[in-house]
Image (tube, helix red, strand yellow):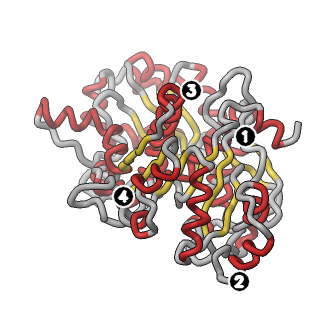
Amino acid sequence: MEAHALERSLPLADVRVLDFSSTVAGPSAARHLADFGAQVIKIESLAHPDTLRVSTPYAGREPGIDRSGYFAVYNAGKLSFHLNMQKARAREIIRRLIVCSDVLLESFVPGVMARWGLTYERVREWNPAIIMASHCLQGQWGPHATHRGYGQIASAMSGWYDLTGEEGGEPLGPYSAYTDFVSWPFLLTAILVALEQREQTGAGQYIDHAQMETSIHFLAAPLLDLQINGHLATRRGNHEDYACPNNAYPCAGDDRWIAITITSDEQWRALCAALALTDLATDPRFATLAARQARERELDALISARTAEEEPFSLATRLQTLGVAAGVVQRAQDLFADPQLQHRSFFRRLPHPAIGEHAVLTQSFRIAGFAPGPHRAAPLLGEHTLPLCHDLLGMSEEEIAACVAEGVLE
């Protein structure tokens, strides 16, 4: 079945989204809407492209506005509309797009949309049924609303960087723009709820989504621990109150590691048997969780000396068979070869005119009866501008030519 036919069979096939968002959080939410059938029109320009278009990695390590693998993953299945919002005439084109759309998603610093005359009050005048979702670092109102930044900044401000790193060491922070990756499902859920409510009321709505506040939801346990017990969580490496040993241990090979977590004495004895450390299984220094935690560094060194002789994947399988929680610290090439991910068809290969055929991520969930996207690769910058001007907006050749001449459609 062709991509268009597959998209038309999906539950959001009658939804049109104007995607003004950039980087990861907003584009991820919009891409999931596209995956389930929505027509997502990405509004961008050569002067102000999505940040990810100029972010590594580039295909073949050759920079180019259409060559970013980062952009390709989070924008597959979308259409790209070239529109220079600095031009006055662009505002009229946006008005016409808003009139025939269901969702407007933006992730600018508060105030940008207002400078373009695109407040929710104005947008609602043009289309009372539209859902406008604004995503930014700290929300649209308040003393810090206009702070600029990416997920790395929100990760630090929300407390995550104080929790990640070695005990007594400097903050290391989780990988990349961490809060971008954990916040978009909340944004997507809010949009879907608004769409469902609109089915009942016919009215649109405004969504104000703060990335920092979303990420704090995942810190509920340490926040409660502080309030109830007066205990302030901070950097502890991989140490945990409920588990020991609990760490990543070296394995045979070039920079290969395995993560192991032991939460019971039974699991501890199984680990000792698997690693031929039978003497430790009955050693009173390590017989209980409290005893193991008292000598955790010594214990980690003993385990590391044994795991360093082991091939990581075979060791992980052996430990899992014995009921021990263990997993290889996988690299990118390991993920593409992972039999579980292959079985669930998590990666999908799509042809792209600039990058060539490449893998994109699919959803982490399956819904019976649906074959969601992405069915098309990410768009080239402005790839669908002219077809959308003709077919969706009904613009004449003369009108399009005038917009091109004025630099509106670029």
Dot in front, 3 or 2: 2
**Above or below — where is 311 with respect to 50?**
above
Would you say the residues marked 2 and 1 are in contact, meaning their CB atoms lie under 8 Å apart? no
Q: Which residue is mark 3?
A: 319
Q: Mark 1 or mark 4, which has the lower sequence index?
A: 4
Disc on the earlier residue, 2 or 4? 4
| Residue type for callout 3 | Leu
Instruction: Tell me the residue that label 1 is attached to.
Output: 373
Q: Nearer the viewer, mark 1 or mark 4?
A: 1
Q: Nearer the viewer, mark 3 or mark 1?
A: 1
Residue at the far bottom: name it: 405
Pointer 4 residue: 172
Q: Which of these two is toward me, 115 or 297?
A: 115
* Local crowd size for mark 1, using a 10 Å CA cut-off: few (<14), some (14–19), many (≥20): many
Look at discs 2 and 1 and give the one toward the viewer.
Answer: 2
Disc 2 to disc 4, how far (Cα)? 50 Å
Q: CA distance from mark 3 to mark 2?
A: 66 Å
For discs 3 and 4, the disc positioned in front in the rendered view:
4
Q: Quadrant of the image for the N terminus?
A: top right
Question: Which mark is in front, 2 or 4?
Answer: 2
Left or right: where does residue 247 sit relative to residue 333?
left
Say few, some or many: other residues with alpha carbon within 10 Å of mark 2 (under 14 / 14 to 19 / 20 or more): few
User: Mark 3 and mark 4: span between their CA atoms?
Assistant: 30 Å
Question: At numbered mark 2, what does the secondary structure look like: helix, strand or loop?
Answer: helix
Q: Whole-percent x and y of residue 73?
A: 66, 53
Residue 164 in percent (x, y) is at 34, 50
What residue does disc 2 label?
A: 405
Q: What's the CA distance linking mark 2 and mark 1? A: 36 Å
Amino acid identity at mark 1: Gly
Using the image, tell me which numbered label, if any, was put on residue 176: none
